[in-house]
Amino acid sequence: MTVAVRFAPSPTGRLHVGNIRPAVLNYLFARSHGGSFMLRLDDTDRERSTAAFAEGIEHDLTWLGFVWDRFARQSDRTARYGEVAGQLKAAGRLYACYESADDLDRKRKRQLARGLPPIYDRTGLRLTPAEHAQMAAEGRTPHWRFKLANSETAGSLVPAPTMVSWNDLIRGDQMVDVGSLSDPVLIRENGTALYTFTSVVDDIDFAITHVIRGEDHVTNSGVQVQLFEALGAELPAFAHHSLLIGADGQALSKRLDSLSIEGFREAGLEPMAVLSHAALIGTSDAIEPHGTLESLAAGFSLSKISTAPARFDLDELKGFNARLLHKLPYEAVAGKLEAAGIGGGEAFWNAARANISVFGDVIRWWSVVAGTITPVIEDAAFASTAAGLLPASPWTEATWGEWTNAIKAATGAKGRALFHPLRLALTGEDSGPDMKSLLPMIGEARVRARLCGQAA
Ligand code: GLU
């Protein structure tokens, strides 16, 4: 079977760490099966969806390294939704209702007061042609509900349970009692279609084989299974992943806006750190940084995803980012180093990478090598003795050892008392890259000036 999946964000906000998880799981599933990945913008909510958010989502996904094989925007497919709604109406599965939000609220309160479940009472279904004509004459436009196929029990106001079941590729056997749900509204009064409906029409039209999304959609899936069936379509496979919790164990849903992909980019995090983290939290795999999406896809399997909530910890992601950088080979960053005006080639990157948490930190180490720093001289006499013992150029990685041995022999200083003042004088920093690599890069002129306490 050819695998076809989709990631379907609503452009009512930017991407955040919560919705990057379904994005990456869908992406890796497609890539690991040689299938296709579609980006679908669920923008039927005209008031809340904006072109700027849509652009932002595409920009964020591109930054993360996603390439989509197909693209669709639900707002472009209005005519198609109208056509399919017509089929459901003709089949008696989509019916007109005229209740206002207040009417529905009153009904719910009455039902609750009588100890009944607050489910829509299907008044719309029982309207006579004369009553419909009356509504039209009054200029009232209906909204449209999907008639769920549940077992109505004649004479009883409490619907009998009607189970919809499927074998979820993450959660195993799932059952949703659609008997306990109201017939969902698929078309609003203003004629626009709602997600429950548009998503199914698109999944059918684009031949989506696997629907991978958060477990907040499990109940939707129960309803949508009935929609697929009502439209005579084959069901896709479903996989519902758990939702994120924060480091404190609390749901992240309210804090997601502060954890945007844009924010991660601005904080200097690497796309592959964000992706590896999002793909591996909540799985049985070790959370290890992967350098490429291909490498992540190679080990991917839905069966490794746990049903327990996945824990997201920003500090862990930052640490993870640092670990990714520490093993990143020069070829992976050469272009970025050049773009940032950083020279020094592979030798500099190899010396600096273990001392950075985000890529931008290399700029500081580059200024130690090639810019001007303020040296810290704790003991001018010691610095002057050290300067007098500097080996003749050209310097290599062996120079640091020769030089410090000579200083040790002359002053008796050893260990930290020997090395630390030299590091402070030559870099202005307490700690940092290996001095044996830095010394030849800093070069004789700067080293001599810094040992004299001059900014150089
Ligand atoms: N627009 C929906 C959401 O963002 C898509 C859910 C789905 O994958 O069907 O939750």
Image (cartoon, rainbow, N blue to C red):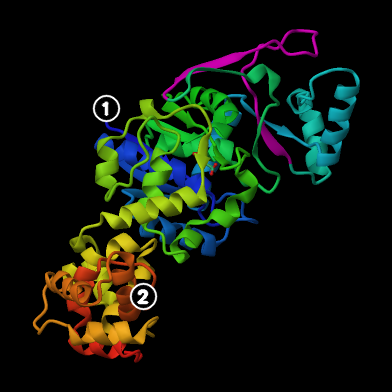
- Span shown in magenta: 142-169
Asked which quadrant contains residue 86, the reply is: top right
The reply to whether residue 447 is visible in this rendering is no
Viewer-nearest of discs 2 and 1: 2
Q: Position of residue 427 (x, y in %)?
A: 33, 77
Q: Which of 231 and 326 is in front in this view?
A: 326
Label 1 beta carbon less than 8 Å to ligand 1: no
> Which residue is found at the position 34% from the left and 92% from the top?
454
Residue occupied by mark 1: 1
Which label is found at residue 364?
Answer: 2
Closest to the observer: 365 or 317?
A: 365
Magenta stretch contains residue 157:
yes
Q: Is 421 located above or below residue 112 in the figure?
A: below
The foreground one among 75 and 106 is 106
Q: Is mark 2 on a helix, strand or loop?
A: helix
The three-letter code of the residue at mark 1 reads Met
Image side of residue 327 versus residue 51, left or right: left
Q: Residue 219: in sight, yes or no? A: yes
Q: Say what secondary structure mark 1 lies in.
A: loop
